[in-house]
């Protein structure tokens, strides 16, 4: 019965570790914008499994950018809920947003010309869809909900 007890202890440790990490991620998502001391560094979310679709939904309604600041056919970097995002305007008045956290190892992807490029290992992503154009990343950038309200881009 020692095996069963050991398995139970391991399960509890695994669940406890997962819970602690989940709590940290929730806290990070709720952090105020002025506490952005870790901005620009690789995110700890790169090694998480099954959490690539999360979005800072508690930031709904946040004024993200001026529509005029996003070039038609291009992209800009911004933040929503303190998290780095990429805003693209594939056609005039249509704005899409993606997490800027690279799905390879968590570096911050940036706009470069008409492309979205990860500076760490060179993955490129489609600015209109977030799909991988060139690896090593295998997964697309997660979509982040935004809407256009007049001349502003709003989270949610
Ligand atoms: Fe982006 Fe490796 S972390 S390509």
Image (cartoon, rainbow, N blue to C red):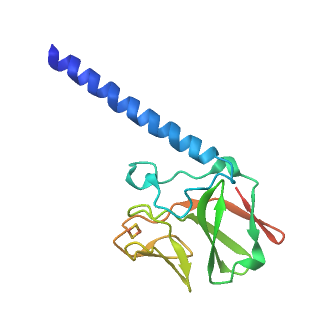
Q: How many marks?
A: 0
Q: Image quarter for residue 6?
A: top left
Q: Where is residue 81 in the image (x, y as percent from the top left)?
A: 66, 53
Which corner quadrant of the figure contains ligand 1?
Answer: bottom left
Q: Residue at x 50, y 66 (%)?
A: 108
Q: Image quarter for residue 26?
A: top right
Residue closest to the far right: 150
Residue closest to the far bottom: 113
Q: Residue at x 66, y 58 (%)?
A: 80
Q: From the viewer's perspective, is residue 68 above or below residue 107?
A: below
Image quadrant occupied by the N terminus: top left
Q: Position of residue 117 (x, y in %)?
A: 48, 77
Q: Where is residue 87 in the image (x, y as percent from the top left)?
A: 64, 70
Q: In this view of the protein, which residue sits in the foreground, 127 or 63?
A: 63
Q: Is residue 155 left or right of residue 25?
A: right
Q: Is residue 64 left or right of residue 21?
A: right
Q: Which residue is drawn at 27% across and 21% down?
A: 8
Q: In this view of the protein, which residue sits in the foreground, 44 or 55?
A: 44
Q: Image quarter for residue 92?
A: bottom right
Residue closest to the far front: 37
């Amino acid at each position: 019965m020692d095996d069963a007890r050991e398995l139970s202890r391991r399960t509890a440790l695994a669940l406890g570790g997962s819970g602690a990490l989940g709590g940290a991620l929730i806290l990070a998502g709720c952090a105020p914008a002025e506490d952005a001391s870790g901005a620009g560094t690789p995110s700890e979310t790169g090694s998480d499994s099954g959490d690539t679709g999360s979005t800072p939904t508690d930031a709904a309604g946040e004024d993200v950018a001026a529509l005029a600041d996003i070039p038609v056919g291009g992209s800009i970097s911004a933040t929503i809920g303190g998290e780095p995002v990429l805003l693209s305007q594939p056609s005039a008045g249509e704005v899409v947003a993606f997490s800027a956290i690279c799905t390879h190892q968590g570096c911050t992807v940036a706009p470069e010309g008409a492309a979205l490029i990860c500076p760490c290992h060179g993955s490129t992503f489609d600015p209109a869809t977030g799909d991988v154009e060139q690896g090593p990343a295998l997964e697309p950038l997660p979509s982040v909900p935004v809407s256009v309200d007049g001349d502003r881009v709003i989270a949610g």
